[in-house]
Each structure stands twice: as C-alpha cells, then as structure tokens.
Amino acid sequence: MSSSIFLVTPPFTQLNTPYPATAYIKGFLNTKQISSKQADLGIETILAIFSKKGLNELFQYIKESGKTLSANARRMVALENDYTDTIEHVIGFLQGKNPTLAYHISKRKFLPEASRFEQTDQLEWAFGTMGNNDLSKFLCTMYMEDLSDLIKEVVDEHFGFSRYAERLGRSANSFDELYASLQGDHTYIDKIYLQLLSYHIDAINPGIVAFSVPFPGNLYTAFRSAQWIRKNKPGIKVAMGGGFPNTELRSLSDARVFEFFDFITLDDGEVPIENMIGFVEGRKNIDDLKRTFILENGKVNYRNNASCKDYKQAELGTPDYSGLLLDQYISAVEIANPMHRLWSDGRWNKLTMAHGCYWGKCTFCDISLDYIKLYEPVAAALLCDRMEELIEKTGENGFHFVDEAAPPALMRALALEILKRRLVVSWWTNVRFEKSFTRDLCILLRASGCIAVSGGLEVASDRLLQLIDKGITVAQVAVVNKNFTEAGIMVHAYLMYGFPTETMQETIDSLEMVRQLFKSGVLQSGFWHQFAMTAHSPVGLDPSKFKVKKLSEAVGSFANNDIAHEDPTGADHEIFSYGLKKSLFNFMQHIGLDDPLQKWFDFKIPKTDVEPNHIEKILLEDALPLFRPSTKLVWLGKTIGVEYYTKSKKGMQREMATITFINKSTSLVIDIPKQDADWLLPMLENMTIGDRLLTLQQMKESHEAAGFEDFELFIDNKPMNTMHKVGLLRL
C-alpha cells in the first residue's frame, strides 16, 4: 500500500482563493518528509460545470428531465447557445485573463441576462467611478448566479457556489437525515466531483485520503466522497478533520459514521494526522492516536494520547499550496462595496499570526475549545519569512491573516518587519476594536500594506457588550474605526442580534448606531447574524447565568454544538432578520442613510433612543497625546533639505533652520531653532525602522543631555505635531 496521503477540500467553499487547511497540513508534512498531494474539488467541480462542454451537458440534461420550468428557466434554456458561446470567456475574464473583454461586457450586449440582472438598477452609481473592469466583474457574477439559479431549480436544489447542501449539515444532532440522503442515487453534481475524485486517486494511489471539512456546507460532499472511496477503493483509509468536526462532532457516538470514515480528528491536525499515518503504516499502535475518533468493536471510541504534545507554531512549516489550481480561481463581485468584496474577489495567501485568541472572553464564542483557548503567537520575523516564501511559490503578494483576532502588538511588529524588509504586500485580518489601535499605529499598519480589517462590534449596545464581555464600548469602536479609516484602512463589522435578554429597543438602537457609523464614514461594510447558543461557549455552558433556558438537555449522537434555547424576554428576534440585512445592504452602498429606521421593517418598531448625532459627537473629541516613557518612536518620512538663516526680532538675533520633509504624498516645511535642528535630525535617523526602536524616554534623556529643557513642551509643540503628517509616529 502507498504511504502517501491525499488531502482534499470537498465542494464547495469559495471560488476566489483556496481554503488554507490542506495547505497548512501539507506544509507541516513537508517538514516530516511525508509525501502528500492536495486538491480543492470545489473549484475543480465549478470549472467542470461552467465550461462549454459542461453547459452543453447541463442544458441537454435539463431538456431530457421533462421538468416544468419557470419563465426564467425557459428564457435561459432558449438562450442556450448564448450561454455556451460566452461561458469560457466569462470564466477566463473572472480568472484575470483577457481583461479587454470588459469593454464588451460592460455595454450589456455580450452576456445573456436573466432574473439576477433585475438587481442592477444601481449600477451607474455603484460603478460610476470604479471602471469597466469592476462593473464587468459584477455583471459576470450576475451571469454566473443566473446559471446557479437554473441548476438549483431544475438539476440540484442543494447547489450553490459555496456551502453545498448546507442544510443537511447544520444543527444535525441526528445523523438520520444525512444518512438517508447518502442512501439515495448520486445527483448530477455528485457525479461530476466523484469523477474528479476518481481521477486524482488513480493518479496518486494514496494510502490515506483526508478530507478537511471547514463548514456544514462541505459535509455532505465529504461523506459522499468517502462513500465512493469505500465502495470503489476499499484499500484506502479515509479520514476527516477541520472546522466542522472541531465544533460539532466532539460528542460523536453514532457508529454509522464509520461506514464512511476510518478516522475523525479534532482541533489542530498536525499531530493527529502524523500519528494516524504512522498507525496506518504499522509504525505506531492504536494507543498513539491523538484526538482521534475510531470504531472499535462496533462502538465509537475517542483515542487521545495525552503524552504526545502538539508542535509549536514555529515548527509547523510554511503552508504549501502546490498542486492547487492557483491560476484558475474565480473572482466574483456580488456587491460594489470595496471592503465587502474582499472575501470573493482576489487571490489571497492565507496565514495565521497566532494560534487561538489573545482575548478569549467573549461569552457567545466557543472559548472553551483548544483552537481558541490555547494562545500562541508567531514571531514577526518568522511570519515575514513565510510571506516571502509564499510570494516566491505562488506569485501572489496578497495575504489574508485568518486569526480569531490578530494581536495589536504583533500587528505592529509585523508591520515594522515588513517595512524593514521593504516587502510590497497587501494584507488584511480580523481584529478586536480595542483602544490599542491608535491613529499612529493605524498609519504604520497602512504603510506596511494593511488594506482592511474586520472585527466584531456584535450588538452596538454598551449593556450587551458588557454582557458579552467584549471588552469594548461603542464609543471606543467609533474612535478606532475613525483611526483605521483616516489611515486608509477599510473596516468591516460583524454584527449580532438576538443575544439573550436583548430587547426590541436595544436591537433598534443598535441599528441606529450602525447607521451613524456608516453615515460618519468610519465603517465601510458589515454583516448581521442572529445569535446562536453553542455548547462550548460560556452561554451554552452556564445558560442560567445569562437568563436563557435550554429547550432540551439531550446530547446528539452526531453533531452537538448549536443548542435550541428560549430567551426569557420572549422576544421574537427572527422578525428583525430581513430588515436588518436589507438596511445594511443599502448602507454599504450609501443608500438610505438619512431615512427613518421604520423604512426597513414591515411591522411597527420603537423610536430609537440614540441621539441623532451621537457618533458624530464622539468623533469630534480630540485624543490626548501619548507621553508614556515606553512609547516607541518611528520616523517614516524623509529629510530632503536644511537651510539656515538668522532671525532678528527687537534687536535680538537667533540662528534658525528651515527643514523640508517629504513622504510619498505630501511635503512639510518647519522652522525651528538651529540648535534644535542640529539635535533633531540625527535623532530622526535613529527613529528609522531597524532592529531596535527609540523610546520616548530615550529621546527625552538625549534632549536633556544636550542641555535642553522642557522636553514635554518641545515634543508637543506645533512643528513636532505637524510632523505627524509626514510620518513621525508614536507607537
């Protein structure tokens, strides 16, 4: 039997960039000289369907199905040749090829149009300043969504570009429904990705196939793929790990799952998969398995060798994306909003700054689980090493750091290291909106290539934020978002409604806060989701503390994370879903920001208690200057000239210096006494980015040693403060 392992992401996750789990594992296995291959069956399946051959077969299947079609579907079938003639041009364009096609697409004469194009009434506003390329991406996305709708209507109701058959995997306390679906015939989509899977397995001849299942929407295809391997390649061992098992399958007891899989692993996958390979190859015994479910004597057993320690982050190697179709991923633009589109547009190398969450207190979050609880940062120098390696291997210099919440201190260190190495990168990550993100830190991050951040505002209510233990206030979020925005960094907020004890008034007040944040221009994008009580969160572990009641104490034999519960207020939070999401969709396009909140709801809502200019007043407050001795000083600007002159006033003469500073976009001239200039210019040289940064205390000591007095007055005078404009930062 071959000792190689085949790492698979089953359909569907995302179109524009690989989900990183298999690349992480492959990078680790490289450090152990263990042979591995990987594939993203999602993008491969999409490319197979959305090709001329694929659409020809699809339309033929629809014609032969004999199903009654909607008017929209009939229109699309009538335009079959227009779709088959354009599909490969569209795919190529969305892959970044043949950009001149935008001139055809943008004129609305090239693509066949169906019902999705009814949503394009704001095109002139949305893309008026963004150019043909972005507009054409949006139109191509609508074209693809039309085809997706056709597939869902006639071919496979579970189809979607991501999260395929998600309903079957969501809150699946019982395995019964999914198991029953797996007993049925293969769907049209099943046959496509199973054929691709067969091709890979024949080419690789692996001893193990390991499926990474990040979301409920990958679950059905993972099981269907495992089922096919069991039937057609019985000598291959099959494993599953990833985000879904980590959160949902921790109490797994249904033996039927092992009709499909030999191993199911939890949490960090490196040691479990290393020991699993050793076990399959006969080098390790069953007691060596780590965080692994197996079937023994007809019963599910959890093997966890506690003596076998996990690897440190520095030991895991650089993610390896080799074998994935990096140049064939598809960028989509579903909305013009430049922040919101980052998740679907562009190719991003995925990395992690730190394992786990440095905060680890949010009461709605699964903070009891190791993947969040165990915090371990990666050194900035090592992160940059990995970035340079990925740039060389993938040819892409965009990075998405997929942390639970990136630590501000590490973000600062990473930014300094990027600038020190003079790397040209674009990067974004998830953060907590905490006060550490000062104006100056945000400027530094932007200088290093940070283009966007996303973070949890959750419920924009100070009472509920305290109950959540978020460690932030709405005012703090507003100021931090202003700092990011003014530095040129886009901001996305994760928003929540329906937290235990949340009242209708608080929901509406939260929406008003969000409206004001958008209107003030300090928030560019957001997403509302309804609170879900999970088994591993503080709310789920101690419901009474949060005045919420479980509707059942039964533990599922399959998935067991989402818990049905009852809010003591009796509030029907679900009724707000459509209005909250509709309003946000409009706010992101700068529409309806001055309209009354009642506009978004078809039922009576209370009048908001939030003052109309609440956020505006907060943003007008000036931040106090930082005078902590440990404050680090960084000089990002450049000095291009010094001229000396003599200033006369009331018979007194004083030697002065005119210094000209520049950065990439601005210039600044200051006049200061010559002796101050003679001391300041060498100090600025010492503040440039290097191995060590000068502190405010060290600058003060140097100032006093030179015979000057009143350092605080000097550092806070007008010339020094205006130097902020060209890059004198206090960190």
Image (tube, rainbow, N blue to C red):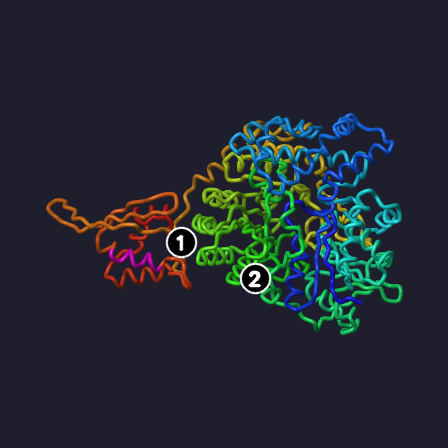
* The one of 721 and 334 positioned closer to us in this rendering: 334
Q: What amino acid type should be assigned to the residue bearing mark 1?
A: Arg
Q: Which label was assigned to residue 521? A: none
Residue at image location 75% in from the left, 56% down from the top: 211
Residue on which disc 2 sits: 377
Residue 561 on the magenta segment = no
- Nearer to us of marks 2 and 1 is 2
Residue ID for mark 1: 730
Question: Is residue 149 something that shows in the picture?
Answer: yes
Q: Residues within 10 Å of mark 2 (few under 14, many from 20)?
A: some
Q: Which residues are magenta?
A: 678-686
Choose between 399 and 323: the one closer to the eye: 323
Q: Position of residue 672 (x, y in %)?
A: 24, 50
Q: Earlier in the sequence, mark 2 or mark 1?
A: 2
The reply to whether the C-beta atoms of the residues labelled 2 and 1 are less than 8 Å apart is: no
Q: Is residue 307 above or below residue 696?
A: below
Q: Is residue 518 above or below residue 596?
A: below
Rendered location of residue 654, percent (x, y): 16, 50
The residue carrying pointer 1 sits among few (fewer than 14), some (14 to 19) or many (20 or more) residues within 10 Å by Cα, namely many
Which secondary structure is most common in the magenta stretch? helix
Relative placement, left or right, of 257 versus 359 is right
